[in-house]
Amino acid sequence: MPNLPSSAPSASAQPANTAPRNEYTVDELARVTDTTVRNVRAYQDRGLLAPPEKRGRVGVYDDTHVSRLKLINHLLARGYTLANIQDLIKAVDEGHDLRSILGLETAIGGRWSRERPRKYSLIELLQMFGDKASPSALAKAVELGVLERDGLSFVSSSPSAIAAGATMAKEGIPLADLLDAVDIARPHFNAIAKALVDLVVRQLDRYEADALPPPADVPELVDAIWRLRPLANVLVEGEMNRALEEASGDYLGDRVAAIMATKLGHPADGHSERERERERPAEKRGAARKSKAKK
């Protein structure tokens, strides 16, 4: 694990068993937090954001900066001024261990992905996707946030998703159809994420809504949230695998049944036994099952 900079939470605030931190250049930090490099510099000048760790001439930021910027953006969107936010942070600093509070910010608001953003030239995308990377498909990817324009290039916050999409495109899946599937699935993923985040941050429900947890409780609370975060990912992956197996099994069963009906000379009526079962009224399905059970 990399050495934590002086601006990062102490070991008591972020447990030692967490995964290595994400690291960002100032450009990457601005991109993942939906702000600008100019804003990052301005927040540092006002003391709202801790300075980066210096490695030679390069400043290296981490998830404590991501979570702080997300908090600032959220408060600005709710109508607070930078002066208000500065007063709030000063009050927190005076009444709490700031390192512990930064640890709580990171545990709740830090990125869940370990991936670093990657920049792609148009030529790279054409090499990956071939003629499927049409202007309309690229425009759809930008609209969905799968890609972000950066001058004449494109940036993705999830290079693994881009690589997976390129592989599927090479297997013959139209890129437009793949992006439509992402568009259809996204609201469902948003709902799932909301439910799981609610489970994680419900650890705060024991405290008053308009008050920070007592300083003595913060390290244990941070540790609990860090333990729960990977479990949420495991739950999502398990449920997704179950759903994919069920959907693919249903399709395979219907397809094989149709092939068997053709091979055996049965008239193809366009409906498999499974589909006919779904179409029967509930009471008839129950009677049919009882009849099969008696046999």
Image (cartoon, grey):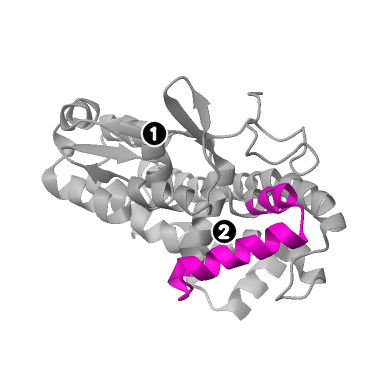
**Horizontal and vertical percent position of residue 288:** 63, 69
Give the mark count: 2
Q: Is residue 208 magenta?
A: no
Residue shown at 39%/33% (left/top)? 159
- Residue where numbered disc 1 is placed: 159
Q: Is residue 80 magenta?
A: yes
Q: Secondary structure at mark 1?
A: helix
- State which quadrant residue 10 falls in: top right
Please state the extent of the stretch shown in magenta in the rendering: 76-105
- Residue where numbered disc 2 is placed: 193
Identified by mark 1, the residue type is Pro
Residue shown at 52%/40% (left/top)? 51
Q: Main secondary structure of the magenta part?
A: helix
Residue shown at 66%/33% (left/top)? 19
**Horizontal and vertical percent position of residue 225:** 74, 51
User: Crowding at label 2, few (<14), some or many (≥20) Cα neighbours within 10 Å?
Assistant: some
Q: Quadrant of the C terminus?
A: bottom right
- State which quadrant residue 164 falls in: top left
User: Crowding at label 1, few (<14), some or many (≥20) Cα neighbours within 10 Å?
Assistant: some
Mark 1 to mark 2 CA distance (whole Å): 21 Å
